Each structure stands twice: as C-alpha cells, then as structure tokens.
C-alpha cells in the first residue's frame, strides 16, 4: 500500500504537467491555423530555442543576474522584517502605533513603486532590488509579529524565574516559539520576490530573465520568448523547492512547551 501511495504521489504531479503541456500543444499547434500568430508560441519552437540558449551559454548570465538580485532582496527584507516584526509583536504600544502604517504600505502593489524607484535609484539593479524588498518584507514582518503575539506567556515567566537574560530569552524562548511562522513567512517571501522579479527587471537593466523576455519580444523571436517563460517557471519551482529544504522545520525532540523550558533550565544550572 505504501509503495502504491509513493508511486501515486510521484506520478500525479508529472501527469498534471503533462496535461498542461498537452493543452499548450493543442491550443497552438492543433486548434491554431498553420502560420497564424498563435502558432508562433507552439512548444516546438520554444523547446528548440531553449536548447539553443543552453548550448550557447546565453541563458546563464541572465539566470545568474536574476538569482543575485533575488538573494540580495531577500537578505535585505529579512534584515528589516525580522527585527521589526519582533518589536511590533513584543511592544503593544509600538504595534498599535506602526500597525496601521504597515497595513497601508503592504497594500500598495510593489510595482506601483516603480516611478519612485526610478527617481531615487535610477534605472538599474538598485531599483530592482528596492522593488523586491517592498514585496518580500511584509510576509516576513507580519509572520514574525504574529508568531511573537502567539507565544505562550508562561515561557517568559519560566525564563525570568530561572534568571535568564534578555538574550537567553530571545534564544531559548522567543526563537523556538516563532520559528515555524518565521520560516513560513520566509518561504512566502521567496515566492513573492520571484513573481515581482520579472516585471521589475524591465526597469532599464541589461541582464536578467525579465530583460531577456523584453529583448526576445523586441526581436520578434516568439520561440525564445516562450523559452524564457519556461525558464522562469522551472526556476521558480526549483527555488521554491530549495526554500522548502533550507527553511524546513526540524523534527521536534520534545513538546513545544517542554523544549524551551528544558533549554532554560540548562541555562539556569550553568548560571
């Protein structure tokens, strides 16, 4: 039974992708008339262009440039969202003061900041990274703040009774308690940043996957345009899988309440 379930779980995603590919082929190669505009977006020229991009090495500089921008944007978003989220969740007055500000800013589409990004940073990678930060900061911040608000107050009481310092409370109480929500916020931020990346790379940069799509459109190379869309989709799937693996929650060795208490007890014994 378990073997059948494993085979089924591995087969269903492949079957779903196969259905998508079949629909793409029918819409552009069967339904569309030969020589029509829709036929230019068929799978055959797309896969042929993709093979040429890989063989010539023209794909890798664009892929590397996009990956570097996403990595920098996520690092800056985490540097902003994590401490601010802890502060908003820990200090009630600060949360009430800045909570409406966060809600207003996060409701603005990241792409709506394009004119401001161009005015302040000019065309180039800095504007792209700014838009990524405006997209990815809010999931991290809100997940962190929500995790802090949901902490069991008994954990902090036990820590203080054991004489734990603020740093020890943060390390052994706050972080184990908010870690699942922080990791979920980071995974969500990765997906949001990748979605915003492509339109953001249309801000006057000369490399990246978004730039490559515009360049293919300007050259009327629709096969390469579809090939770049395939690269973006596959890269997003790989990035999401990598984020799941890196940000996976470790297997619990004790209950959610007993583990921080045991860690703090060890700290108290050392003190």
Image: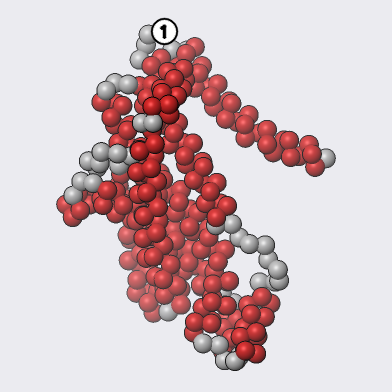
State the colouring used for the structure image.
secondary structure
Residue 65 horizontal/vertical position (percent): 34, 43
**Quarter-wise, where is residue 9 in the image?**
top right
Q: Nearer the viewer, residue 121 or 104?
A: 121
Residue 187 position (above or below residue 201): below
For the N terminus, give its image quadrant. top right
As drawn, is 207 to the left or to the right of 83? left
Residue 3 position (above or below residue 174): above
Extreme-right residue of the structure: 1
Q: Nearer the viewer, residue 150 or 227?
A: 227
Bin the neighbour count of mark 1 within 10 Å (Cα to Cα): few under 14, some 14-19, many 20 and up: few
- Which residue is found at the position 53% from the left and 82% from the top? 168
Residue at the disc numbered 1: 34
- Which residue is found at the position 66% from the left and 72% from the top? 256
Secondary element under disc 1, as helix, strand or loop, is loop
Residue 74 horizontal/vertical position (percent): 40, 56
């Amino acid at each position: 039974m378990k073997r059948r379930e494993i085979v089924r779980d591995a087969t269903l995603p492949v079957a779903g992708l196969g259905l998508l590919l079949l629909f793409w082929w029918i819409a552009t190669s069967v339904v569309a008339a030969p020589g029509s505009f829709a036929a230019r977006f068929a799978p055959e020229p797309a896969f042929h262009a993709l093979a040429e991009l890989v063989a010539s090495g023209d794909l890798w500089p664009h892929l590397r440039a996009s990956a570097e921008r996403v990595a920098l944007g996520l690092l800056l978003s985490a540097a902003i969202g994590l401490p601010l989220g802890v502060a908003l969740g820990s200090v009630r007055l600060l949360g009430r003061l800045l909570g409406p500000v966060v809600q207003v800013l996060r409701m603005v589409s990241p792409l709506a900041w394009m004119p401001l990004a161009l005015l302040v940073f000019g065309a180039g990678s800095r504007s792209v990274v700014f838009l990524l930060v405006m997209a990815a900061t809010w999931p991290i911040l809100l997940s962190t703040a929500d995790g802090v608000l949901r902490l069991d107050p008994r954990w902090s009481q036990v820590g203080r009774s054991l004489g734990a310092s603020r740093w020890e409370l943060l390390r052994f109480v706050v972080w184990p308690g908010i870690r699942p929500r922080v990791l979920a916020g980071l995974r969500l931020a990765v997906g949001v940043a990748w979605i915003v990346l492509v339109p953001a790379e249309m801000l006057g940069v000369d490399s990246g996957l978004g730039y490559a799509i515009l360049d293919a459109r300007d050259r009327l190379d629709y096969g390469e345009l579809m090939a770049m869309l395939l690269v973006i989709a596959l890269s997003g799937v790989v990035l999401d899988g990598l984020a799941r693996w890196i940000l996976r929650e470790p297997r619990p060795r004790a209950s959610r309440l007993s583990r921080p208490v045991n860690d703090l007890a060890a700290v108290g014994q050392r003190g």
